[in-house]
Image (tube, helix red, strand yellow):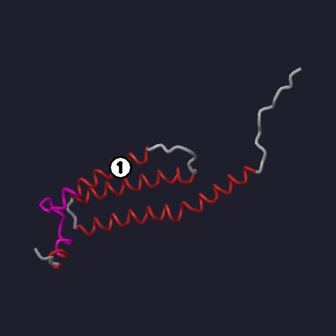
């Protein structure tokens, strides 16, 4: 079967209905994304975690949850696929902005604070003298 670009573009702007072969895979993908997002958020890492990353993790989690719920509602409402694609691209753009623009300066500040604290003597236990 030859590829018809006109048909592809036409389907891209038509409502996303249940007869489409991509409808149920999209529904399953959103459901799997929700479950994966919850598992990722609750995953406990070993070792020290930067406070900035720990704080921004909840922002990324809730941004993903809100966008996935919006995508799910738009799939149920049978909006055209390009709107769903724009929504997913917007979600990825916000997450990229958080991880590439907001997080690095906060992590640099945290590392500088850790290095600064190493130069100060830490309060230790006082040893008692034996008599």
Q: Is residue 23 magenta?
A: yes
Secondary structure beneath label 1: helix
Q: Which residue is mark 1?
A: 36
Identity of the residue drawn at 29% across and 59% down: 71
Residue 96 sits above or below residue 13 on the image: above
Report x, y in % for residue 5.
Answer: 18, 78
Q: Quadrant of the N terminus?
A: bottom left
Q: Quadrant of the C terminus?
A: top right
Which span of residues is magenta-colored? 10-25
Report x, y in % for residue 28.
Answer: 24, 53
Residue 56 sits above or below residue 126 on the image: below
Identity of the residue drawn at 77% across and 39% down: 123
36 displayed left or right of 128: left
Report x, y in % for residue 75.
Answer: 23, 59
Q: Residue furthest top?
A: 131
Report x, y in % for residue 51.
Answer: 57, 50
Identity of the residue drawn at 59% across and 62% down: 105
Q: Is residue 47 magenta?
A: no
Identity of the residue drawn at 53% across and 65% down: 101
In front of the other: 79 or 61? 61
């Amino acid at each position: 079967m030859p590829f018809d670009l006109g048909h592809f573009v036409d389907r891209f702007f038509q409502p996303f209905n249940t007869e489409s072969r991509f409808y149920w895979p999209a529904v399953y993908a959103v459901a799997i994304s929700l479950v994966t997002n919850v598992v990722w958020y609750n995953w406990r890492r070993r070792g020290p975690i930067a406070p900035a990353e720990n704080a921004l993790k909840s922002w990324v989690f809730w941004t993903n949850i809100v966008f996935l719920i919006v995508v799910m509602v738009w799939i149920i409402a049978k909006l055209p696929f390009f709107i769903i694609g724009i929504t997913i691209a917007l979600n990825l753009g916000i997450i990229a902005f958080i991880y590439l623009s907001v997080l690095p300066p906060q992590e640099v500040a945290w590392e500088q604070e850790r290095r600064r604290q190493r130069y100060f003597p830490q309060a230790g236990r006082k040893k008692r003298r034996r008599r």
